[in-house]
Image (tube, coloured by chain):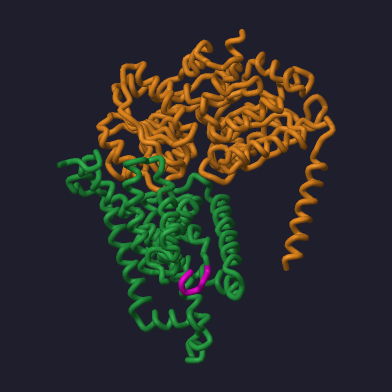
Chain colours: A orange, B green
Amino acid sequence: MKFNCKKTLLAIAVSMGLGATFTANAGNEVVIGDIDDMSGLYADVIGQGGIEAVKMAISDFGPTVLGKKIVFLSADHQNKPDVGSSKFREWADKNELNMLLGGSNTGVSLAMAKVAGEKKVPFIAVGAAGSSLTNQDCNAYIVHYSYDTTSLANGTASVITKEGGKSWYFLTADYAFGTQLQDAATKVVNANGGKSLGAVRVPLSASDFSSFLLQAQGSKAQVLGLANAGNDFTNSLKAANEFGITKTMKPAALLAFISDIHSLGLQTAQGLYLTTGWYWDLNADTRAFGKRYFEKMRKEPTMNQAAYYSATLAYLNAVKAAKTTDSDKVMEELHKLKINDMFVKGGYIRADGVMIHDMYVMQVKSPQDSQYPWDYYKVVKRMPGEEAFGPLSDSTCPLVKKK
Amino acid sequence: MTELFGFPIPVILGQLLLGLVNGCFYAMLSLGLAVIFGLLGVVNFAHGAFYMLGAYGTWALMNFLGIGYWGALVLSPLCVGLLGITLERTMLKRLAQVDPLYGLLLTFGLSLIAEGFIREAFGASGQTYPVPELLQGALNVGFMILPIYRVWVIVASLMVCMITWFVIERTRLGSTLRAATENPQLVQAFGINVPLMVSLTYAAGVGLAAFAGVLSAPIIQVSPLMGSSLVIVVFAVVVIGGMGSIMGAILSGLMLGVIEGFTKVLYPEASNIVVFVIMAIVLCWRPNGLFGKG
């Protein structure tokens, strides 16, 4: 029995080694990777839908670039920074990875961003919100594509504070993402004449939020800032409704996706303000993409799934323009590129790595206002990219200071 | 007068009550684990998955068959119990004679399969289940607004815990069951169908998990991972109570729920590890757990 086990393990190890040798390319492939949460609390934000979006982008671009076949790899980081970064390293070393798309989780993306700098592989962070990726943790190979904590805060927090929600209390996911989001929102609240009365830091994937919410209620703040995401966000909003907290405090979603709103239902989510970089029902282009995606996945894409599509196309266009997959040259082209597709109009990548594009503050519709399936948001405000992401002079990224 | 550890008394009372609600879930889940371990010697790592399936069963009964909460309260644990019998008969039974580690690995694998299957079928963000009409609304208990549904959770779970304890410790059926685990051959010689009893016990244990799942469906998002984030804590609760001790599981479940509740106020960042810290202390001091036998 034991001998058999050993034999099997050996066989697996050998076949894995062989697998790696077979997949290594001799420069006649362009390899795009995707490392994301495929099985955890953020799996619906990008996950399988992201994989589908990348496949759509590759087939829209054409199966080849510079005459080379486009190969796509994906892996689950299980929300563990070490798993994400070691997979990235492995692909860079063995599979000659040309570009990595980073899925959800700021913690994992920060770890992978370091590897990108080390291995000189372009890293397009989509799911991570933490703006430190383009500030103190930046390097020349990072592009931050979909949104960041600054733009999220500039949306929701500024609209609510201007509407009279002057005192805030935060429910914060206790890791890099939550704390950065809270800091960014606090800055915006203060700048608009409001103040933060405090915060409670909640461990990721807590099973019950009611006692944290009671603490928030005890603060007597007007606004409940939810600096969390995924199931943590849906569970905390659900409990806030159950305990009648939403009657005295206005909930503010600092990061919510259409998948969250869909799973919560409009009855619970109605009236909520949130900030998004994209919505399927904005214009004819977004609706057309939504329709194609829906046919495959039976749901509308989140902003990050749409961003996966757009980021893949942007990278491939940069390769085409650079006429090489050489990382430095492709990065140079990426920074020159004007990005125009269904995700963004006139988008561009700034020196610090932020992709500047319009952001939207949305309000969730009531069940009565929702006319058709997935008709969830109404646009409250369209923020031009420069307003959403703040001036380049605010960036602490050393790449900016050099210039 | 109105403060304790620098916190107003109403805040402390509110947290105590919420801790008790969470403690009820811990108690029900650890009770099922303790029954299964105590009587079958199986470390049932799939317990969280059965809890999750109980909640999904509730949601599915409503969405696909139009059966509401009260029907689900009976039907969902029953269905999950039947699934439990099937797994026990076809797989777990074969591992009865080998190291308990194999049972642990099998049940861990099964829970991964269940989670993966549900995620593929219904997505990771989960489903919303409404609070049943009869239990909607909230009571103003002076120091906090208490949703009626949470009161129901306390009542229902304490009832179920007490009934389980009574059946195992105080009835003839329970004593036969305990005898069958001590010496199956002898009990079988008396004409009692021991394998059937073992199957039913496993079914009852996982049924308890499913019952907890039904109770939780209206208050948290019914999601594939709801069980796995809870099961590790519940294992710690069982270890603290003493592996296999029925009353130990119930009492330590409630107690740890309350302690965790206080931690959420005093030092929220530590609320997800406090149970494990207590486990480590208990194991150093009483390796058999607080209520475990010598």
Observer able to see residue B29 = no
Q: Which residue is nearer to you in this view: A198 or B54? A: A198
Q: Main secondary structure of the magenta part?
A: helix
Q: Is residue B189 magenta?
A: no
Is residue A161 shown above or below A53? above
Counting from the top left corner in percent of width and height, residue A338 is at 63, 15
The magenta stretch spans which residues? Answer: B37-42
User: Is residue B111 shown left or right of residue B79?
Assistant: right
Counting from the top left corner in percent of width and height, residue A168 is at 32, 28
User: Is residue B7 shown left or right of residue B163?
Assistant: left
Which quadrant does the C terminus of chain B fall into? Answer: bottom left
* Residue for point 25% across, 46% down: B14
Is residue A387 shown above or below B58? above
Observer able to see residue B284 = yes
**On the image, which quarter does residue A121 sit in?**
top right
* Residue for point 29% across, 25% down: A167
Q: Which residue is nearer to you in this view: A132 or A277? A: A132
